[in-house]
Amino acid sequence: EIALAGFKKEEVNVYTEYGKLIVEGKKSDKTESEYVHRGVAQRNFTRAWTLSDDTEVRKVIFEDGLLSVDLGKVVPEHHARKDYL
């Protein structure tokens, strides 16, 4: 989960590329003013996490300024438990 207060759903992009989960936030409104400090809600950002080969993104939800990414582990069939009796 990532708190993204101040961002709209259209300004957040979540995708996977080359085994990485990437979350980008791009603010659509540009102002001509200069600031000494701008809070997280007013800046563009990109964050990336490396995923293992057996991890998949199952669901992404952005609601009320909170981004939730549901990850799951994929178990290959030949590694899955089999009951013989």
Image (cartoon, rainbow, N blue to C red):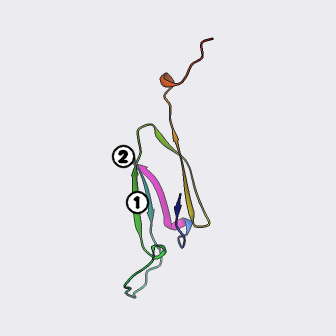
Whole-percent x, y for residue 33 in the image: 40, 88
Is residue 43 located in the magenta-colored stretch of the structure?
no
Give the residue drawn at x 40%, y 63%: 46
Query: Relative to 70, is 80 above or below?
Result: above
Q: Does 7 sit above or below residue 71?
A: below
In magenta, the rendered stretch is 10-19
Q: Amino acid at mark 1?
A: Arg
Res. 53 image quadrant: top left
- Residue 12 position (above or below residue 74): below
Q: Main secondary structure of the magenta part?
A: strand
Q: Which residue is tagged 2?
A: 18
Q: Nearer the viewer, mark 2 or mark 1?
A: 1
Please state which of residues 17 and 50 is positioned toward the viewer in this rendering. 50
Farthest residue, direction bottom = 33
Q: Quadrant of the C terminus?
A: top right
Residue 79, image x, y percentages? 48, 24
Residue density around tag 1, few if under 14, some if 14–19, many if 20 or more, within 10 Å: few
Q: Quadrant of residue 30?
A: bottom left
**Which residue, given by chain and number where applicable, does mark 1 sit on?**
47
- Secondary structure beneath label 1: strand
